[in-house]
Image (tube, rainbow, N blue to C red):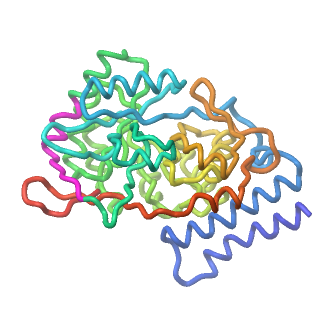
């Protein structure tokens, strides 16, 4: 039966190569769903955790990072301390910017209900908001470029040199602006600087690379191995951000990681709360086996989400590890899911503060 399932799993390339219209987030997410389900089935038939079929465990667990944020430094420091208390050993830093209101990555009570806690407390993870239409936010790149280095200087002074720090520029900078930011952040020894320019034009990362040694991460909006060819072969990035969910599944993402390993580029899989526990578990089974694992983003799902999916992976001492349950180690309860009907939510859009021009979000 296992060999038969293996033949079924090999049909996933047919879904890609057999189609005329290829790539894109919808097509690749559909293929990923089929591929991941077939790996889960095959591992269950073999009565072993999926990571055993992928080559076996290479490490005790997958290093993760959490998301700390604050409108002011005092609030950011409190968030960092809270994450350290939870056991995180690497932390993404996002801060408010003087003169701007809502800023990407900074928690607020506006989206607290999307965390599923039933309270109006901060929710550090989900930027989508329940509203009739996307909320418009203001942006000022010069203010951001002035402020970000000051934030990291303050964080390093408060928490010391050892804590791995990450930061997401969220595709908002031109190449020369990104180069400037990367260079100015070098004294603060970032683990990575993420998504510094819009990902569509990968060649512009040459300009960034020329000016800074700050490690670069990109790829959460990429869907196939072809998106990475130039980045890998010219060694323009240091970490691959694609998730299992949007890159065609476990089979396709493993190909991407194998390709990256040739150029000493590591994994840094995207892990927001809109990647379900199924997608996170798939990333963990893959991450615990590959030789070039780097880090795993970990936004803790709400209690309601965990009640629906019943994941068995474990978080301890900064590491996430898949369980030894057969397959992915994730279930699904239809009855519980039906008790939580879908409620529409939108990601914001971005306009420049100066003149109201639409800007990259």
Q: Nearer the viewer, residue 178 or 297?
A: 297
Counting from the top left corner in percent of width and height, residue 121 is at: 40, 37
Counting from the top left corner in percent of width and height, residue 340 is at: 58, 58
At 48% across and 49% down in the image, what residue appears? 241
Q: Nearer the viewer, residue 278 or 19?
A: 278
Counting from the top left corner in percent of width and height, residue 36 is at: 69, 59
Task: Residue 264: tell me if it is visible.
Answer: no
Counting from the top left corner in percent of width and height, residue 317 is at: 60, 23
Question: In this picture, is 171 found above or below 85?
Answer: below
In the picture, measured across the screen, residue 261 lies left or right of residue 138, that is right
Q: Is residue 140 magenta?
A: yes
Task: Residue 90: tell me if it is visible.
Answer: yes
Magenta part of the protein: which range? 136-149
Q: Residue furthest left?
A: 355
Q: Quadrant of the N terminus?
A: bottom right
Q: Nearer the viewer, residue 155 or 122?
A: 122
In the picture, measured across the screen, residue 99 lies left or right of residue 94, that is left
Q: Is residue 87 magenta?
A: no
Q: Does the magenta stretch mainly form a helix, a strand or a loop?
A: helix
At 57% across and 45% down in the image, what residue appears? 261
Q: Nearer the viewer, residue 230 or 317?
A: 317
In the picture, measured across the screen, residue 308 lies left or right of residue 69, that is right
Q: Residue furthest right?
A: 1
At 76% across and 63% down in the image, what residue appears? 38
Question: In this picture, is 124 found above or below 243?
Answer: above
Q: Quadrant of the C terminus?
A: bottom left
């Amino acid at each position: 039966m296992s060999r038969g399932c293996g033949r079924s799993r090999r049909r996933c390339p047919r879904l890609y190569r057999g189609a005329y219209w290829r790539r894109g987030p919808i097509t690749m997410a559909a293929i990923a769903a089929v591929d991941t389900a077939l790996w889960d089935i095959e591992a269950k038939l073999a009565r072993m955790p999926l990571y055993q079929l992928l080559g076996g465990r290479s490490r005790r667990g997958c290093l993760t990072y959490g998301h700390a944020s604050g409108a002011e430094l005092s609030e950011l420091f409190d968030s960092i301390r809270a994450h350290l208390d939870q056991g995180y050993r690497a932390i993404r830093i996002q801060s408010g910017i003087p003169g701007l209101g809502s800023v990407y990555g900074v928690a607020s009570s506006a989206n607290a209900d999307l965390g599923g806690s039933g309270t109006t407390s901060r929710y550090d993870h989900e930027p989508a908001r329940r509203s009739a239409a996307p909320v418009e936010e203001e942006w000022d790149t010069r203010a951001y470029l002035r402020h970000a280095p000051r934030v990291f200087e303050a964080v390093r002074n408060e928490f010391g040199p050892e804590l791995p720090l990450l930061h997401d520029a969220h595709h908002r900078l031109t190449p020369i602006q990104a180069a400037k930011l990367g260079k100015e952040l070098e004294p603060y020894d970032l683990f990575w600087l993420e998504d510094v320019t819009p990902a569509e034009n990968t060649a512009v990362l040459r300009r960034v690379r020329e000016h800074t040694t700050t490690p670069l991460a990109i790829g959460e909006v990429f869907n196939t191995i072809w998106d990475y060819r130039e980045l890998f072969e010219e060694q323009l990035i240091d970490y691959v951000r694609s998730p299992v969910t949007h890159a065609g599944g476990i089979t396709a993402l493993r190909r991407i990681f194998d390709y990256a390993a040739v150029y000493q580029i590591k994994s840094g899989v995207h892990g927001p709360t809109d990647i379900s526990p199924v997608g996170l578990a798939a990333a963990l089974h893959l991450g615990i086996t590959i030789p070039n694992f780097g880090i795993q983003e970990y936004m803790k799902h709400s209690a309601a989400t965990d009640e629906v999916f019943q994941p068995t992976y474990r978080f301890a001492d900064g590491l996430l590890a898949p369980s030894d349950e057969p397959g992915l180690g994730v279930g699904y309860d239809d009855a519980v899911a039906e008790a939580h009907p879908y409620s529409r939510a939108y990601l914001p859009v971005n306009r420049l503060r100066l003149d109201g021009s639409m800007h990259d979000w």
